[in-house]
Amino acid sequence: MSIEVVNITKSYKNFTALSDVSLQIPEGELVALLGPSGSGKTTLLRLIAGLEQPEQGSILFNGEDNTDRDVRERRVGFVFQHYALFRHMNIFDNIAFGLTVRSRKTRPSKQEIHERVHSLLKLVQLEGLAHRYPSQLSGGQRQRVALARALAVEPKFLLLDEPFGALDTKVRQELRRWLRHLHGKLGLTILFVTHDQEEAMELADQVVVMNEGKVEQVGSPEEIYNRPANPFVYSFLGRVNLFHGRLRDGKVQLGETEYETQWGQKTGEYPTIGYMRPHDVEISLVPHVGQSVKAQIRRISLLGPIVRLDLKRLDTEEMFEAELTRQRFLELQLEENKVVYATLHNVSFYVDSQQAIAPSPTLVPLRISI
Ligand SMILES: Nc1ncnc2c1ncn2[C@@H]1O[C@H](COP(=O)(O)OP(=O)(O)OP(=O)(O)O)[C@@H](O)[C@H]1O
C-alpha cells in the first residue's frame, strides 16, 4: 500500500516538531527516515500510524484519506526500538496476541492461528522456539519476534522505529540483511526510522533525510550521497572538508587555487564555501600545476584498508582530511610533517546567501564537481 503525507504540521505547545512536511512512499518500497536526534522522524511515524493527530495536513493510504481514522482502523504494523514483548507469555502467545484479542466475529479459528504463528516463526527463522519466554531469547531474536507479531495481523504496511537500535553492531548487520531479504519476499511497504546513515544506505530503496522538522532531500542512497541537495545533507552523509573562498566574476578563489564555475554571468563578489569528500583528495609528491595545493601532514591514522591524513593547507592554513588506500600510502612513503601536494576533486560550491544574496539562512548551490 502506498503512503502519502501532505503538508503535515505538528507542534507540541510552542515547539514545531514537523513543519509542512510532504512525502510520497510508493507501494512495496523499503524507505528510511534518516536524520539527527530531534529532527521529527518518530513524530512522523507516529502520525502515519495514527498515534498522534496533526494540526494541519493529511495522510493518505492508496490515495484514501486516513487522517481522522483511529489507529486500529489503519491496520499498521509497528515495531519500536525497545519492543516490550509480554514477559509472561511465551513466543507463540506473543505472536498470536493480535489475533486472539479480536472479537469472536473476526477472530480466526484456533487451527488457523496455530498455522499462521508457525508460518511466521518459520519466516523469522525461529522455528522450535515457540515455547520459550522472551527472557530466554537474545536481543536480535526478540526483535524478530516483535516483527513476527507485527506481521501476524496482516498489516497494510510496516513502520519500524529504530528496530535494531539497541543491538550490537554484528547482530544489527545480520538483522539488516535479514530484513532486506524479508522485504524482498513479502513485497510489503516498509518505512523505518534510523539515525545511522550506513543502515539507511545499505537497506533502503529511498532515503528521506530530515532536519529540524523538515524534509531536506528524498532520493536513492546513490543520489543523496553523490548529489546532496544542500550543505546539511552533504555533511550528514559522511565526512566532509570545507574550504572558505570567494566567488568573483564566475570564478571561485580558494587560497592559491582558482576554479571555473558555470556562473560566469554573475557579477560581484560573494563568500563561498567549497564542500568535498576526503576520498576525493588526491595526494602526490609533485605539484599538478594550477590545481594542487601545498599541505603538511599533521597526523596519520591507519584504519584497516584505508589511511586517513589530517592535513594543513599552507596557503590558507585550513585543516582538511584525505583518505587513501594503504597501498597508495606506502607507495608515497608518507610520514607526519611531510609536505605534499593535494588536488581537490569534486568540490561542490555553495554561496553563503545569508551574507551575500538574500536574507535566507540557507546556502545556495552553485555548481557540483570540478
Ligand atoms: N510529546 C512531546 N511533547 C513535547 N515535545 C515533543 C514530544 N514528542 C516529541 N517532541 C519533540 O519534538 C521533536 C522531534 O521529536 P522526534 O522524537 O520526532 O525526533 P526524532 O528525530 O525521532 O529523534 P530521535 O532520533 O532522538 O528519536 C524533539 O525536539 C522532541 O523533543
Image: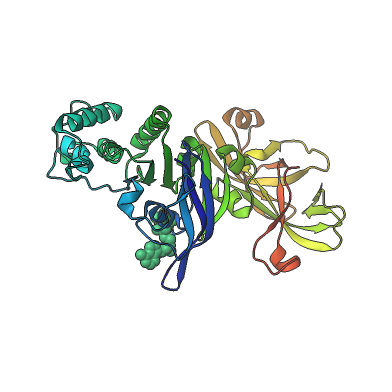
Q: Quadrant of ligand 1?
A: bottom left
Is 54 located above or below residue 5 in the figure? below
* Quadrant occupied by the C terminus: top right
Residue 313 rendering spot, x and y as whole percentages: 70, 50
Residue at left offset 70%, top offset 61%: 352
* Quadrant occupied by the N terminus: top left
Residue at left offset 80%, top offset 57%: 247
Residue 275 rendering spot, x and y as whole percentages: 67, 50
Q: Nearer the viewer, residue 176 or 64?
A: 64
Residue at left offset 40%, top offset 54%: 42
Res. 97 in view: yes
Count of residue discs: 0
Res. 136 in view: no
Q: How is the image coloured?
A: rainbow
Residue 208 rendering spot, x and y as whole percentages: 52, 47
Is 290 located above or below residue 319 in the figure? above
Residue 205 rendering spot, x and y as whole percentages: 51, 37
Given the current orientation, which residue lies at the most extreme front position? 105
Q: Nearer the viewer, residue 71 or 218?
A: 71
Where is residue 89, by image quadrant? top left
Residue at left offset 75%, top offset 65%: 357
